[in-house]
Image (cartoon, rainbow, N blue to C red):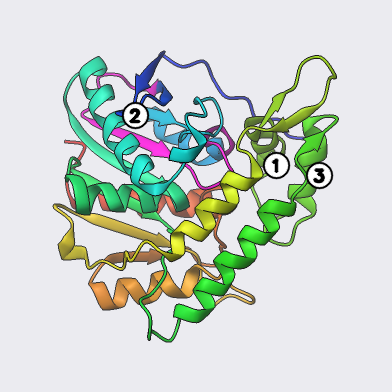
Amino acid sequence: MIRLTVPESLESFWIETPDGARILARRHGVADAPLRILLSHGNGFAIDGYLAFWLPLCARYDVVVFDMRGHGRSGRGDPARHDYPHMARDIGAVHDGATARLGAKRSLGLFHSMSGRAAMHDAIDIAWRWDALVLVDPPDIPPEGHPLHDGSVAFERRLADWARARRDRFADPSEQAALYASSRVHKGWTAGSHALMAEAVLRSNGADGSWGLVCPRDLEAEIYLANIAMDLWPRASDFGGPVLLLGADPTRDRPSPTARPNAAMAEEGGFDYRRIDGAGHMLQIEAPAACLAALHAFIDRHRLDR
Protein backbone atom coordinates (compact mmCIF):
# COMPACT_ATOMS: atom_id res chain seq x y z
CA MET A 1 0.00 0.00 0.00
CA ILE A 2 1.33 3.45 -0.95
CA ARG A 3 1.29 5.90 1.92
CA LEU A 4 1.55 9.62 1.16
CA THR A 5 2.97 11.93 3.82
CA VAL A 6 2.59 15.69 3.91
CA PRO A 7 6.05 17.21 4.37
CA GLU A 8 6.91 19.71 7.06
CA SER A 9 6.25 23.26 5.93
CA LEU A 10 8.94 25.91 5.70
CA GLU A 11 6.71 27.94 8.00
CA SER A 12 3.09 28.21 9.01
CA PHE A 13 1.05 31.12 10.27
CA TRP A 14 -2.51 32.00 11.18
CA ILE A 15 -4.44 34.61 9.23
CA GLU A 16 -7.47 36.26 10.76
CA THR A 17 -10.29 37.03 8.35
CA PRO A 18 -12.37 40.24 8.54
CA ASP A 19 -15.06 38.55 10.63
CA GLY A 20 -12.60 36.82 12.98
CA ALA A 21 -12.33 33.32 11.49
CA ARG A 22 -8.81 31.90 11.53
CA ILE A 23 -7.12 30.31 8.51
CA LEU A 24 -3.86 28.36 8.82
CA ALA A 25 -1.51 29.03 5.90
CA ARG A 26 1.52 26.80 5.31
CA ARG A 27 4.46 27.63 3.08
CA HIS A 28 6.24 24.93 1.09
CA GLY A 29 8.50 24.90 -1.92
CA VAL A 30 11.15 27.39 -3.02
CA ALA A 31 10.90 30.50 -0.87
CA ASP A 32 12.81 32.75 -3.29
CA ALA A 33 11.05 31.56 -6.46
CA PRO A 34 9.63 34.44 -8.52
CA LEU A 35 6.08 33.02 -8.50
CA ARG A 36 3.96 32.23 -5.46
CA ILE A 37 1.06 29.80 -5.91
CA LEU A 38 -1.72 29.78 -3.31
CA LEU A 39 -3.99 26.72 -3.31
CA SER A 40 -7.18 25.56 -1.65
CA HIS A 41 -9.82 22.85 -2.03
CA GLY A 42 -13.41 21.84 -2.57
CA ASN A 43 -16.42 21.52 -0.27
CA GLY A 44 -16.02 18.86 2.43
CA PHE A 45 -12.39 18.18 1.53
CA ALA A 46 -9.01 19.55 2.70
CA ILE A 47 -5.87 20.65 0.89
CA ASP A 48 -3.62 17.92 2.32
CA GLY A 49 -5.63 15.38 0.35
CA TYR A 50 -4.50 17.06 -2.89
CA LEU A 51 -0.82 16.36 -2.14
CA ALA A 52 -0.30 14.32 -5.31
CA PHE A 53 -0.98 17.51 -7.27
CA TRP A 54 0.66 20.24 -5.22
CA LEU A 55 3.79 18.48 -3.96
CA PRO A 56 5.46 18.51 -7.43
CA LEU A 57 4.89 22.29 -7.54
CA CYS A 58 7.19 22.66 -4.55
CA ALA A 59 10.25 21.88 -6.67
CA ARG A 60 9.76 25.04 -8.73
CA TYR A 61 7.48 27.55 -6.99
CA ASP A 62 6.84 29.29 -3.68
CA VAL A 63 3.75 27.35 -2.58
CA VAL A 64 1.21 28.36 0.08
CA VAL A 65 -1.54 25.88 0.92
CA PHE A 66 -4.52 26.55 3.17
CA ASP A 67 -7.84 25.06 4.17
CA MET A 68 -10.99 27.12 3.88
CA ARG A 69 -12.86 28.03 7.04
CA GLY A 70 -14.48 25.05 8.70
CA HIS A 71 -12.24 22.58 6.89
CA GLY A 72 -9.01 20.71 7.51
CA ARG A 73 -6.53 22.52 9.74
CA SER A 74 -8.29 25.88 9.75
CA GLY A 75 -10.69 27.16 12.40
CA ARG A 76 -14.41 26.61 12.07
CA GLY A 77 -15.55 30.19 12.63
CA ASP A 78 -19.15 31.20 13.18
CA PRO A 79 -21.42 28.59 11.53
CA ALA A 80 -23.81 31.40 10.53
CA ARG A 81 -20.99 32.86 8.41
CA HIS A 82 -20.02 29.62 6.68
CA ASP A 83 -21.04 30.96 3.28
CA TYR A 84 -19.67 32.26 0.01
CA PRO A 85 -19.65 35.98 0.88
CA HIS A 86 -17.39 35.29 3.87
CA MET A 87 -15.29 32.70 2.02
CA ALA A 88 -14.69 35.21 -0.77
CA ARG A 89 -13.31 37.66 1.76
CA ASP A 90 -11.24 34.84 3.26
CA ILE A 91 -9.52 34.40 -0.11
CA GLY A 92 -8.54 38.06 -0.09
CA ALA A 93 -7.43 37.89 3.53
CA VAL A 94 -5.15 34.92 2.83
CA HIS A 95 -3.60 36.59 -0.21
CA ASP A 96 -2.99 39.82 1.69
CA GLY A 97 -1.86 38.03 4.85
CA ALA A 98 0.61 35.88 2.94
CA THR A 99 1.95 38.95 1.16
CA ALA A 100 2.39 40.81 4.44
CA ARG A 101 4.13 37.86 6.07
CA LEU A 102 6.23 36.56 3.17
CA GLY A 103 6.76 39.63 1.01
CA ALA A 104 5.27 40.80 -2.27
CA LYS A 105 5.86 38.86 -5.48
CA ARG A 106 3.91 37.63 -8.48
CA SER A 107 1.06 35.45 -7.27
CA LEU A 108 -1.22 32.87 -8.82
CA GLY A 109 -4.35 31.62 -7.10
CA LEU A 110 -5.28 28.02 -7.82
CA PHE A 111 -8.62 26.97 -6.42
CA HIS A 112 -10.75 23.86 -6.82
CA SER A 113 -14.54 23.67 -6.74
CA MET A 114 -15.90 25.56 -3.68
CA SER A 115 -12.76 27.63 -3.21
CA GLY A 116 -12.83 28.35 -6.95
CA ARG A 117 -16.34 29.78 -6.68
CA ALA A 118 -15.25 31.86 -3.68
CA ALA A 119 -12.23 33.12 -5.64
CA MET A 120 -14.46 34.04 -8.60
CA HIS A 121 -16.72 36.04 -6.28
CA ASP A 122 -13.71 37.78 -4.73
CA ALA A 123 -12.02 38.55 -8.05
CA ILE A 124 -15.13 39.93 -9.78
CA ASP A 125 -17.12 41.55 -6.97
CA ILE A 126 -14.45 42.63 -4.46
CA ALA A 127 -10.97 43.05 -5.99
CA TRP A 128 -8.63 41.55 -8.54
CA ARG A 129 -5.49 40.77 -6.55
CA TRP A 130 -3.70 38.13 -8.66
CA ASP A 131 -1.25 38.06 -11.51
CA ALA A 132 -3.25 35.05 -12.73
CA LEU A 133 -6.01 32.77 -11.51
CA VAL A 134 -6.63 29.06 -12.15
CA LEU A 135 -10.14 27.74 -11.51
CA VAL A 136 -10.37 23.97 -11.26
CA ASP A 137 -13.81 22.62 -12.19
CA PRO A 138 -15.87 25.12 -10.18
CA PRO A 139 -19.49 24.01 -9.69
CA ASP A 140 -20.91 26.66 -12.00
CA ILE A 141 -24.66 27.04 -12.35
CA PRO A 142 -25.79 28.36 -15.75
CA PRO A 143 -28.43 31.11 -15.70
CA GLU A 144 -32.12 30.28 -15.83
CA GLY A 145 -33.18 29.37 -19.34
CA HIS A 146 -29.82 27.85 -20.18
CA PRO A 147 -30.11 24.22 -21.39
CA LEU A 148 -27.82 23.07 -18.54
CA HIS A 149 -29.45 25.08 -15.75
CA ASP A 150 -32.02 22.60 -14.45
CA GLY A 151 -29.62 19.66 -14.39
CA SER A 152 -26.99 21.66 -12.50
CA VAL A 153 -29.52 22.79 -9.90
CA ALA A 154 -30.82 19.26 -9.43
CA PHE A 155 -27.27 17.98 -8.95
CA GLU A 156 -26.49 20.49 -6.19
CA ARG A 157 -29.71 19.56 -4.42
CA ARG A 158 -28.83 15.87 -4.60
CA LEU A 159 -25.41 16.66 -3.14
CA ALA A 160 -27.02 18.59 -0.29
CA ASP A 161 -29.30 15.66 0.51
CA TRP A 162 -26.30 13.31 0.41
CA ALA A 163 -24.24 15.55 2.68
CA ARG A 164 -26.94 15.79 5.33
CA ALA A 165 -27.20 12.00 5.45
CA ARG A 166 -23.51 11.11 5.10
CA ARG A 167 -21.72 9.17 7.78
CA ASP A 168 -19.96 11.54 10.19
CA ARG A 169 -18.43 9.27 12.87
CA PHE A 170 -15.68 6.71 12.34
CA ALA A 171 -13.64 4.36 14.50
CA ASP A 172 -10.59 5.20 12.41
CA PRO A 173 -9.75 7.26 9.27
CA SER A 174 -9.29 4.01 7.36
CA GLU A 175 -13.08 3.63 7.36
CA GLN A 176 -13.52 6.93 5.49
CA ALA A 177 -10.64 6.00 3.18
CA ALA A 178 -12.45 2.78 2.31
CA LEU A 179 -15.62 4.73 1.51
CA TYR A 180 -13.68 6.96 -0.87
CA ALA A 181 -11.99 3.99 -2.52
CA SER A 182 -15.25 2.12 -3.05
CA SER A 183 -17.10 5.13 -4.48
CA ARG A 184 -17.64 5.25 -8.25
CA VAL A 185 -16.89 8.97 -8.12
CA HIS A 186 -13.68 8.78 -6.07
CA LYS A 187 -12.18 5.36 -6.69
CA GLY A 188 -9.95 6.66 -9.49
CA TRP A 189 -7.81 8.84 -7.24
CA THR A 190 -4.03 8.48 -7.29
CA ALA A 191 -2.75 5.72 -5.00
CA GLY A 192 -2.49 6.88 -1.41
CA SER A 193 -4.85 9.83 -1.83
CA HIS A 194 -7.88 8.08 -0.31
CA ALA A 195 -6.11 7.55 3.01
CA LEU A 196 -4.53 11.00 2.98
CA MET A 197 -7.83 12.75 2.28
CA ALA A 198 -9.56 10.75 5.00
CA GLU A 199 -6.96 11.85 7.54
CA ALA A 200 -7.33 15.46 6.36
CA VAL A 201 -11.13 15.68 6.67
CA LEU A 202 -11.41 13.94 10.05
CA ARG A 203 -10.45 14.98 13.55
CA SER A 204 -10.12 12.82 16.66
CA ASN A 205 -12.91 13.30 19.16
CA GLY A 206 -10.50 12.50 21.99
CA ALA A 207 -12.14 10.78 24.92
CA ASP A 208 -14.14 8.09 23.12
CA GLY A 209 -11.47 7.42 20.49
CA SER A 210 -13.78 8.09 17.54
CA TRP A 211 -13.16 10.39 14.59
CA GLY A 212 -15.58 12.97 13.19
CA LEU A 213 -15.85 15.19 10.14
CA VAL A 214 -14.10 18.52 10.56
CA CYS A 215 -16.69 20.20 8.35
CA PRO A 216 -20.14 19.47 9.81
CA ARG A 217 -22.36 17.80 7.26
CA ASP A 218 -25.12 20.45 7.56
CA LEU A 219 -22.62 23.18 6.66
CA GLU A 220 -21.37 21.12 3.72
CA ALA A 221 -24.97 20.80 2.53
CA GLU A 222 -25.55 24.56 2.83
CA ILE A 223 -22.61 25.28 0.51
CA TYR A 224 -24.00 22.97 -2.16
CA LEU A 225 -27.31 24.83 -2.02
CA ALA A 226 -25.53 28.20 -1.97
CA ASN A 227 -24.06 27.42 -5.40
CA ILE A 228 -27.56 27.65 -6.85
CA ALA A 229 -28.24 31.18 -5.65
CA MET A 230 -24.89 32.78 -6.53
CA ASP A 231 -25.83 34.15 -9.97
CA LEU A 232 -22.23 33.78 -11.10
CA TRP A 233 -21.74 32.91 -14.80
CA PRO A 234 -18.95 35.28 -15.80
CA ARG A 235 -17.01 35.99 -18.94
CA ALA A 236 -13.23 35.87 -18.95
CA SER A 237 -13.22 39.63 -19.55
CA ASP A 238 -14.93 40.16 -16.17
CA PHE A 239 -11.63 39.30 -14.47
CA GLY A 240 -8.73 41.70 -14.10
CA GLY A 241 -6.11 39.36 -15.56
CA PRO A 242 -5.47 35.96 -17.13
CA VAL A 243 -7.64 33.06 -16.00
CA LEU A 244 -7.26 29.36 -16.80
CA LEU A 245 -10.32 27.14 -16.46
CA LEU A 246 -9.47 23.46 -15.91
CA GLY A 247 -12.44 21.16 -16.32
CA ALA A 248 -13.53 17.58 -15.90
CA ASP A 249 -13.98 15.67 -19.15
CA PRO A 250 -17.52 16.17 -20.52
CA THR A 251 -17.00 13.45 -23.17
CA ARG A 252 -16.22 10.52 -20.90
CA ASP A 253 -18.77 7.88 -19.97
CA ARG A 254 -20.95 9.24 -17.13
CA PRO A 255 -19.15 12.59 -16.87
CA SER A 256 -19.18 14.65 -13.72
CA PRO A 257 -22.24 16.96 -13.71
CA THR A 258 -19.81 19.89 -13.41
CA ALA A 259 -18.05 19.04 -16.68
CA ARG A 260 -20.55 20.27 -19.28
CA PRO A 261 -21.34 23.56 -17.49
CA ASN A 262 -17.64 24.43 -17.35
CA ALA A 263 -17.17 23.60 -21.02
CA ALA A 264 -20.22 25.75 -21.82
CA MET A 265 -19.06 28.67 -19.67
CA ALA A 266 -15.64 28.49 -21.32
CA GLU A 267 -17.12 28.60 -24.83
CA GLU A 268 -19.69 31.30 -24.06
CA GLY A 269 -17.34 33.40 -21.92
CA GLY A 270 -14.14 33.19 -23.93
CA PHE A 271 -12.07 31.44 -21.26
CA ASP A 272 -8.69 29.83 -21.71
CA TYR A 273 -10.01 26.32 -21.07
CA ARG A 274 -8.39 22.91 -20.82
CA ARG A 275 -10.37 19.75 -20.17
CA ILE A 276 -8.51 16.92 -18.48
CA ASP A 277 -9.27 13.87 -20.59
CA GLY A 278 -10.87 11.01 -18.73
CA ALA A 279 -11.08 12.89 -15.42
CA GLY A 280 -13.99 13.66 -13.17
CA HIS A 281 -14.53 16.46 -10.68
CA MET A 282 -11.52 15.56 -8.50
CA LEU A 283 -9.22 15.88 -11.51
CA GLN A 284 -6.19 17.07 -9.52
CA ILE A 285 -5.92 13.75 -7.72
CA GLU A 286 -7.27 11.63 -10.56
CA ALA A 287 -4.87 12.96 -13.20
CA PRO A 288 -2.27 15.11 -11.45
CA ALA A 289 0.29 14.89 -14.26
CA ALA A 290 -2.16 16.20 -16.86
CA CYS A 291 -3.30 19.00 -14.55
CA LEU A 292 0.31 19.98 -13.85
CA ALA A 293 1.13 20.01 -17.55
CA ALA A 294 -1.78 22.37 -18.24
CA LEU A 295 -0.75 24.60 -15.34
CA HIS A 296 2.91 24.80 -16.39
CA ALA A 297 1.89 25.63 -19.97
CA PHE A 298 -0.36 28.44 -18.70
CA ILE A 299 2.42 29.83 -16.48
CA ASP A 300 4.86 29.70 -19.39
CA ARG A 301 2.41 31.40 -21.80
CA HIS A 302 2.06 34.34 -19.43
CA ARG A 303 5.73 34.34 -18.38
CA LEU A 304 4.70 34.33 -14.72
CA ASP A 305 7.80 32.71 -13.23
CA ARG A 306 10.45 34.84 -14.92
Q: Are the residues at dot 1 and dot 3 in contact (C-beta closer than 8 Å)?
A: yes
Q: Is residue 173 above or below residue 207?
A: below
Tell me which residue sits at (63%, 77%) in the image: 253
Among the 4 quarters of the image, the one containing residue 144: bottom left
Q: Amino acid at mark 1?
A: His
Of the 4 image quadrants, the one containing the C terminus is top left
Front-lying residue, 144 or 237: 144
Residue 19, numbered label: 2
Residue named by callout 3: 178
Residue named by callout 1: 194
Magenta-highlighted residues: 28-49
Q: Is residue 279 above or below residue 118?
A: below
Q: Is residue 179 above or below residue 183?
A: above
Tell me which residue sits at (60%, 37%) in the image: 215
Say whether residue 278 is left or right of residue 107.
Answer: right
Q: Is residue 32 magenta?
A: yes
Q: Amino acid at mark 3?
A: Ala
One can see residue 139 in this view: no
Of the 4 image quadrants, the one containing the N terminus is top right
Task: Assign a secondary structure to mark 1.
Answer: helix
Front-lying residue, 152 or 303: 152
Q: Locate residue 152, reporting x and y percent.
A: 50, 73
Q: Quote the CA–CA distance across marks 3 and 2.
A: 37 Å
